[in-house]
Amino acid sequence: MLESNKDSAKLDAMKRIVGMIAKGKNASELFPAVVKNVASKNIEIKKLVYVYLVRYAEEQQDLALLSISTFQRALKDPNQLIRASALRVLSSIRVPIIVPIMMLAIKEASADLSPYVRKNAAHAIQKLYSLDPEQKEMLIEVIEKLLKDKSTLVAGSVVMAFEEVCPDRIDLIHKNYRKLCNLLVDVEEWGQVVIIHMLTRYARTQFVSPWKEDDGLEDNEKNFYESDDEQKEKTDKRKKTYAMDPDHRLLIRNTKPLLQSRNAAVVMAVAQLYWHIAPKSETGIISKSLVRLLRSNREVQYIVLQNIATMSIQRKGMFEPYLKSFYVRSTDPTMIKTLKLEILTNLANEANISTLLREFQTYVKSQDKQFAAATIQTIGRCATNISEVTDTCLNGLVCLLSNRDEIVVAESVVVIKKLLQMQPAQHGEIIKHMAKLLDSITVPVARASILWLIGENCERVPKIAPDVLRKMAKSFTSEDDLVKLQILNLGAKLYLTNSKQTKLLTQYILNLGKYDQNYDIRDRTRFIRQLIVPNEKSGALSKYAKKIFLAQKPAPLLESPFKDRDHFQLGTLSHTLNTKATGYLELSNWPEVAPDPSVRNVEVIELAKEWTPVGKAKKENSAKKFYSESEEDEDSSDSSSDSESGSGSESGERGESGEEGDSSEDSSSGQESESGSESGVEDERTAKRNSKPKGKSDSEDGEKENEKSKTSDSSNAESSSIEESSSDSESESDSESETESRRVTKEKGKKTKQDRNPLTKDVSLLDLDDFNPVSTPVALPTPALSPSLIADLEGLNLSTSSSVISVTAPVFVPMKTHVLLHRMSGKGLAANYYFPRQPCIFGDKMVSVQITLNNTTDQKIENIHIGGKKLPIGMQMHVFNPIDSLEPEGSITVSMGIDFCDSTQTASFQLCTKDDCFNVNIQPPVGELLLPVAMSEKDFKKEQGMLTGMNETSTVIITAPQNFTSSVILQKVVNVANVGAVPSGQDNIHRFAAKTVHSGSLMLVTVELKEGSTAQLIINTEKTVIGSVLLRELKPVLSQG
Amino acid sequence: MIHSLFLINSSGDIFLEKHWKSVVSRSVCDYFFEAQERATEAENVPPVIPTPHHYLLSVYRHKIFFVAVIQTEVPPLFVIEFLHRVVDTFQDYFGVCSEPVIKDNVVVVYEVLEEMLDNGFPLATESNILKELIKPPTILRTVVNTITGSTNVGDQLPTGQLSVVPWRRTGVKYTNNEAYFDVIEEIDAIIDKSGSTVTAEIQGVIDACVKLTGMPDLTLSFMNPRLLDDVSFHPCVRFKRWESERILSFIPPDGNFRLLSYHVSAQNLVAIPVYVKHNISFRDSSSLGRFEITVGPKQTMGKTIEGVMVTSQMPKGVLNMSLTPSQGTHTFDPVTKMLSWDVGKINPQKLPSLKGTMSLQAGASKPDENPTINLQFKIQQLAISGLKVNRLDMYGEKYKPFKGIKYMTKAGKFQVRT
């Protein structure tokens, strides 16, 4: 049929062949006939032939080569689907001869325009590697290239390839770390799992341990212990302030939403990430999600319960609130039941033991006897762990001895034996009772246990013990080996303590043992005989026989079978099996000193680095080169022309309305600057701020100052709020559409195809050019792009302004903190905030604010959260997640995002604890409402040319000439405002550029040095209010010495 | 990652195998059969079985074992979750996932599996995308295909795979635009002998059936979102919007999908809608036991309880039961000792009951535990947690969709200990 001309006949034939393959029948003799059809036009036939080829190519290598040329042709096909599938099949044909062809194909595909093809290339890497490991070096190059890919489609696959081919080349990750963290949420779920596991390992090698003792932040000298749980690790006392690496924090923060994934594997991956790398105080949030997974299928339950079991050993508290979720149902499979029991035991404590014991009682009666037996062991463990209930448990277990089921009784005996061993005193009654049971119990372990117990306590039950021995001697031959050994032991012990009655009996037993079939028993018999029966040959040892046999034996520790699993990474196969699986990669211990964090910095435009003030290592660290360039959406290339025409007219309109608003603002600000008293206050404030950097380390001093400046701030705010209201009304009109469209662009990552996306069409075109430059929260390194992509990007400019604007990393981050809530007014809760000058992760229009909460009381402060918000219209705020509790002397840093709408208005809100609410305000200094941008001098001049007239404000500064060196000016300016330096051709002109966070309007600052000791300060911006405020703030700073 | 997949039916035959890397001999399944033998019931087969060179990870659904063979370390949940996704996909494609159906559609199954994994790593698992790649078989299409010789393999790369909304295909068109949401809540409870609640919690899901043209953007808000304690979303839901406003905002996939599953916090008291009165007693001396159950409504908010079904695993000693129900039908399987009683609706005026005697094995001692009773029921038009959808809005499209919301409460794992 395969020779037939008709496609339908061929198809039918192929379907039958595939059916044969599926059933596992050998269809290899058809190979030549099938291969001919590889070039078929019919796609379904083609696909089925592919299926066949992949299956049998290995066996028929020569014939398989016939098909290769077809694939090579298909690799050049314009349809990306065909390219991808050709690559897929080509790489799946496991014929060593074609390795070079595959290598070539992979290299080409990794530069393909279609991310789908690139994804397939990433898969092909693994296939080629398994076929020919010698290609490793070349493949690593491809991986390196693909790692830089910013498509979410590719990320998962390439990390998978990385894990398979070169998991030890951690250096490849550095540059991509932040990108991966940021992309994570958008990657498909399977990729997420792989990436999270990889990043966990990465984090363990790159960051220092966050598991520290909770000290207050004020206490700068903190002891830096390894956690209690990691006792194996040598405790390491180093005096050093622990500050979490921002990258470490980034990872933890970005994975948190994934706990809400519907995919159990993702949730588990995040859980293990939190477990292994998050600070202990934050691990708690995973328990809820893990408990949710228990609703899933039994297989998922099984794995999750195993992991919970391991976690619950180390940290009971995590799962205690969910105790009842682990109650056993009679319909659960046995393995689930045992795991649940295990967890219940781990969670048992004084408070809940009585409820648990009641619950256990029902389990003991279960029809599933294996489970009932496990329950009894559990009770035993609870009894040993919690001394209060030992007696109750013991009594309960004794009651079970009269149970009808043998397994239950046997298990009880064994457990009672262990319990009694721990408290050997005054339990004669129980022992007697058990001795009686010896007649009825047949389970060897139980019999052995009873015998051992009697032997051990033979002095307490002098009458019974010999009698038992007599009975046992009778049945010796028919006993199990285990029991026989114990009979021998019992005999020996009785011989030593009560030789009068038992001498003959023991000798009889020893004789029996001598001829036993089991060598172990014969051996033991000989040993005991030599030891206890005095004769000439026996040396010194027999004197000590009593001591040997009746020594105090240490009580056994009833331990969890999950105890030893904790050295495996949670959620891995190795953890489940409790053995090292092939390819398991150990999670390394935390490094004592963090490797250089700067390796993760993606290279910023060189100049920004040059300008960074030297000699301030601390600043250097905190200045994260985070966003090097605003990312243009890849897809927007098709639509750029579209949107431009659409937005052109609109933005014109917008500009007009903006100017209208501006003019009124301008006039009001003019009035304001006239009022002398106020500018005096202003001066004072800025003067203080200027003095700030020197006393930076001196936090107390700074606090006072902040307070002062704050009061002046607020007076300023009142007046400025009036002027802002006009600008607000302007932004209000589009704020609705803005939020709308922001949602769309942001959350969907790269969705800007307006034509495809009718949602944005009618409402948000107006704003698109506004926020596109700000773009998605994806850090995209310029050098990380493959050349073709750069070329792509260059053609992508959406609007006029975006051609030159690219957000850069802040040049300098002042460590100045402001008081949010003083500890006196906050009843012991103190809060400080500062502006980290990083693009906010919560929204592109928000300013990120870091709040450090300190608990200065001696009690826990619980449930710290943000209550009512009183925000001016248009302002938005992304609150931090409620903090469950803050230990005394503890401190925690959280980050928030506030959209100040480019105004210096105060954001008022309530900071609430469990008991109280405090009204607090955040008022941003105008310099913090900016994001630095990098642009060339030419662009700067061009933009400046467009922002003249009333968009320009200027002033003259007079100061000593030594203040006019470039480094001093840079230092002063960046201290006040978050601006980026623009390279300048002239020595006497310094330029700085930034854009406002909310609207993205440019803010251009020029300092032009004149003759003598004067200089001109010019600010060009559309937002004249901010411009003038900034001017007022900059002026005194620059004039000062 | 995943090397091979074997499908094994309950009688231990491998009826389908698929390899993504080198062929693994099916003899590897012998280890699985060994484990299967050791476990008395199919449910007790451990999901992870190590063998000298491979690891077998299996899931058991629809009386079929899906056994994945892997060779190296991989998160077990990754594989298990994927296998479940495979089963879901089959169900989606063929309506049911059973051995005969898979055998009948072996080619489609093969094609689907080929697309789902590449080299053992998941490639396309969204059913929206898969269906564009490989059209699900329908009777009509089968007829057309045989006549015209056309195929059920799509020749275009589904746009969803590349777009930023990977779960939705583009170019969806409907004449009737409709969006239905089912809020289904399940009560998991353990009730002890005396009728008091040991543990009870509510697990809910919102299943959606959305057939809307174009790229609609929906928002769904609740009257009382605080009730939801722990939620997990379909990837389409915008997490940040939920964090900040407690509103579900999403571009839905086309067709049926699970939008949200949630957990109602355990702190809230759960209203238990039914009670069971039971009197089950065995006597030591005689070989007869008494058996009596009555089911009645408790807190039902005025709604009727439907679809009530009582099942109970009787102790091994019970030989047979002679029972008379006041309504519905009952069966007792003397081999598995499973009693099931299909009650139907509960009429509060005349409570359904099941009475009679059990005959016990002569001479055997009385079982020491009374059987637990598993209960199933349904209450329409009620979400027991009190969750209410406030409104559903659509943006991005011009037409007016038809919207509908249905509530239902069901028994999840509802057990009464006796």
Image (cartoon, rainbow, N blue to C red):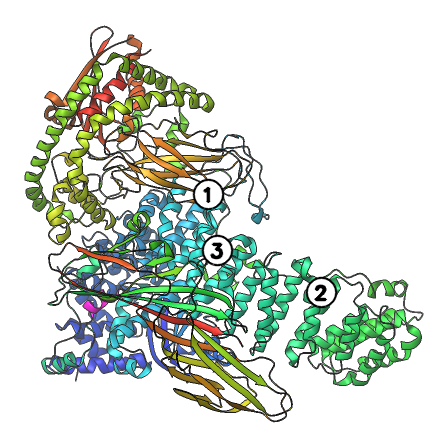
Vertical side of A1016 occupied by A554: above or below? below
Which numbered disc, 2 or 1, marks the residue that appears first in the sequence? 2
Element under disc 2? helix
Q: In x, y percent, where is residue B225?
A: 33, 55
Residue receiving disc 3? A569
Vertical side of A990 occupied by A146: above or below? below
Going by the picture, which residue comes out furthest to the front?
A: B349
10 Å crowding of disc 2: few (<14), some (14-19), many (20+): many
Distance between mark 2 and mark 1 Cα atoms: 44 Å
Vertical side of A248 occupied by A396: above or below? below
Residue receiving disc 1? A914
Q: Are marks 1 and 3 on the same chain?
A: yes
Distance between mark 1 and mark 3 Cα atoms: 36 Å
Q: Residue at x 27, y 81 (%)?
A: A19
Q: Which chain does the numbered disc 2 sit on?
A: A
Residue A3 seen from this side: no
Distance between mark 3 and mark 2 Cα atoms: 34 Å
Q: Nearer the viewer, residue A511 or B256?
A: B256
Q: Amino acid at mark 3?
A: Gln
Label at residue A720: none
- In the image, the segment drawn in magenta is B125-134
Element under disc 1? loop
